[in-house]
Image: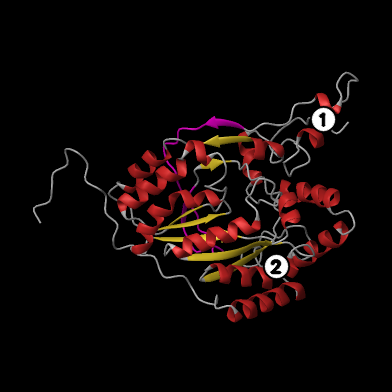
Amino acid sequence: MDENRHRARGRAALSNAPGRYERHDREAVDDGWARDDDLPPLRTEVAVERPRKVITRNASPDVPFDRSVNPYRGCEHGCIYCFARPTHARLGLSPGLDFETRLIARPGAAEALARELARPGYRVAPIAIGTNTDPYQPIEGDWRVMRQLLEVLAAHRHPVQIVTKGTLIERDLGLLREMAAERLVQVGISVTTLDRKVARAMEPRVPGPAQRLRTIERLAGAGVPVRVMVSPVVPALTDHEVEAILRAGARAGARAAGYIVLRLPLEVAGLFRDWVEAEFPDRAARIMGRVREVHGGQEYDPHWGRRMTGQGKWAELLSQRFDLARRRHGLARDLPGLRCDLFAVPARVGDQLSLF
C-alpha cells in the first residue's frame, strides 16, 4: 500500500522522505489492518514563529535585489518544482509532503519589519517578497501576515517587489494602487502553463492559469505595473507554451516579461523525478534527459550565471524564442523604476516633531 499516494490527494509530492540533515529514515509499512480508504487525507497544519528579524540579505548576482522578507515557511501551493522545498529540511521537516502540509506562519513579522526599518543605519532599497515561498498562498486569507507587511511598507513609503501565483493579491488592490501611484510597487505573476490539467498536477493548490491572467488584468487596470513570469520553463513539458503565455500576459495588461528555466536543487530533483514518472510516464525519460542536457549533464547546476537560464543549444534557442516573443507583444522593456527617495519612518506617539 502506498500510504502517501493515497493520503496526498490534492498534493504534488509523492513521498515524505526525511531531509538531508536527518539521521534516520521513515518508511510506511502495511501491517494488514488498515485499508486505503481508512486513511485520513493529509490536512494542512500551521505552526507559529515569532521572528525578531525578518529582512534576509543576499549577494547573489542572479537576482536584482539584495534583501527579501518571507511571511511564511513552507507553501500550501505545493508546486512540485519549488526550489524552496529544501529549506524545510533545516527545520527538521521533509521537503516532500511536509513542505506542503506543515507550514509556519510568522505573525509579528510586520512589527519586526517596522523595527528594522526604523534603525538609524538602515539604507533603503527595494524589498522582495515571494522569492522563496508564496506570500499569497491560501493560509494568508486567515493569517494576513502579508497584508500587515504591506501596510508597514506603505506607511514607510518603502519600495517593494512582489512575486506570486496567488489571486488573493486582489484583496490588497486598494493599497497596491496607492503605492503604485508613488512608484513604490512592482508585481510579478507567474504563469507556468496555460494547460489547466498540467497546472493542476504540477501546482495542485495554485489558482488556475485563467484566474492568474485575470489577476494580471485587474492589477494592470488599477495602475499596478505587472510582469508576467514564465517560471519555471519545464523542458519537454511546458517550453512549447512560451509564446502563448507571453501573448496571453500582454493581452491581460502585463508590461514586461521574464522567465527562469527549471532548476532542481538538492531534494527537489528526486521529488520531481518521481512526480514526472507518475504523471507523465510516456515522456518522463525525455523530460529528465532534456533537464540534464540544459544543466550540463546534471539534474541541477548551482553555478551563478547559468543556473536560472541553462546552457547549451536548447537554452540558447529558448532565449531567442523568448526575446522574439516579448518584442512581438510589447513586453521587451523594464517596469518603471521604484522610488527610494520617499522613504520615511512614520512618527510615533510621543516622538518629538520637527520644527521644519
Query: Secondary structure of the magenta portion, mostly?
Result: loop
On the rendered structure, is 30 left or right of 252? Answer: right
- The residue depicted at 51 percent of the width and 41 percent of the height is 140
Identify the residue under disc 1.
27
Q: Position of residue 19 (x, y in %)?
A: 70, 38
Q: Is residue 63 part of the magenta span, yes or no?
A: yes
- The residue depicted at 74 percent of the width and 43 percent of the height is 13
Q: Which of the two residues, 193 or 251, is positioned nearer the viewer here? A: 251
Mark 1: which amino acid? Glu
Which quadrant is the N terminus positioned in?
top right
Residue 329 position by quadrant: bottom right
Q: What kind of element bears circle 1?
A: loop
Which quadrant is the C terminus positioned in?
bottom left
Figure check: 2 above or below 262: above
- Labels 2 and 1: the sequence-earlier one: 1
- State the extent of the magenta-drawn residues as a range: 45-69
- The residue depicted at 37 percent of the width and 47 percent of the height is 151
Figure check: 213 above or below 39: below
Q: In the image as oriented, which residue stretches furthest toward the top?
A: 33
- Residue 109 visible (yes or no): yes
Identify the residue under disc 2.
310
Q: Position of residue 235 (x, y in %)?
A: 76, 64
Residue 337 position by quadrant: bottom left
Q: How many marks?
A: 2
